[in-house]
Image (tube, rainbow, N blue to C red):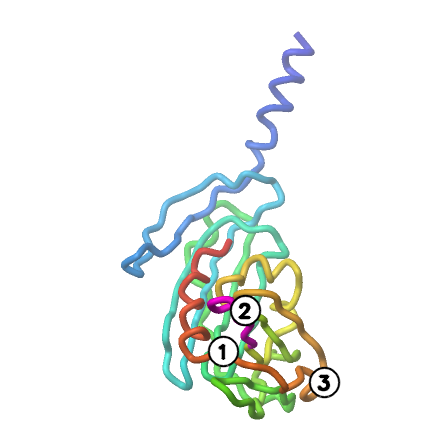
Amino acid sequence: MHLLTLIFGIVLLPKTYTLTCYQCVPGSSGTCTGTTKQCPLRAHQCRAARITSYIGDSKLADVNIKTCALDEQCLEGAVNFGITRTVITSKCCATDLCNSEPAAEPSLARDNGLKCHRCDGQKCSTLNCKGNEDHCISAAVNLRGEKKIMKGCASEKMCSDTANAQIAGAIPGETSCCQGDFCNSASSKSAGLLLLVAPLFSLVMFS
């Protein structure tokens, strides 16, 4: 009898203590239809995330996501390639259905003093980093068999291995980050506007 009780306890206990969170991933129409989900792991929190993308000063996309997430997935930061800038904000919590409210919209970001190379089309220029963008970034992508480079500014958390798996839609290909003005060398062939903008839309599927 005691053995049977122990077996049931081992099987059922992890499920008993996992959170129930709102699950909301935008569909093809851009709207977000919410359901609830039992998180698979006790380490999961409930997360509300917001992905806001800009072309220049104009907002390109504003996407809300709700899901279960590990602590390291509750990241905030920005990737800025000059023409396009993508900002992720997150709000994580540890009670059932606590992610009912959307994550906050990004606040106005001002120049922070760091300068990085920005590559756009076939030329590179200076990019003034904003807000918490404290690293320079280089992203190598393959387009029709030819290597292209995107360069700009990024937040430290967007340069981590954990973040790379989540933001692959915003930064397609291998990336490297460095600290210090103009540490991302300007000598490279660079990606055009379409390559910079198109990958942002696949970012909504990260979790």
Q: What element does badge 1 sit on?
A: loop
Q: Amino acid at mark 2?
A: Val
Residue in the picture at 44% in, 68% down: 200
Q: Where residue 58 sits in the image (x, y, percent)?
A: 37, 83
Please name whichever residue, 85 or 50, is drawn nearer the observer in this view of the structure. Answer: 85
Q: Is residue 42 left or right of residue 84?
A: right
Please name whichever residue, 72 or 8, is drawn nearer the observer in this view of the structure. Answer: 72
What number is the disc on residue 141? 2
Q: Is residue 29 above or below residue 170?
A: above
Residue in the picture at 60% in, 24% down: 11
Q: Where residue 48 sits in the image (x, y, percent)?
A: 47, 58
The residue that disc 1 covers is 191
Residue 142 belongs to the span the image colors magenta: yes
The magenta segment is 141-149
Q: Determine the main secondary structure of the stretch shown in magenta.
A: strand
Are the residues tagged 2 and 1 within 8 Å (C-beta)?
A: yes
The earlier-in-sequence mark between 2 and 1 is 2
What number is the disc on residue 180? 3
The earlier-in-sequence mark between 1 and 3 is 3
Q: What element does badge 3 sit on?
A: loop
Q: What element does badge 2 sit on?
A: strand
Are the residues tagged 2 and 3 within 8 Å (C-beta)?
A: no
Q: Is residue 162 left or right of residue 32?
A: right
Q: Amino acid at mark 1?
A: Ala
Q: Quadrant of the N terminus?
A: top right
Question: From mark 1 to mark 3, how far is it between C-alphas?
Answer: 23 Å
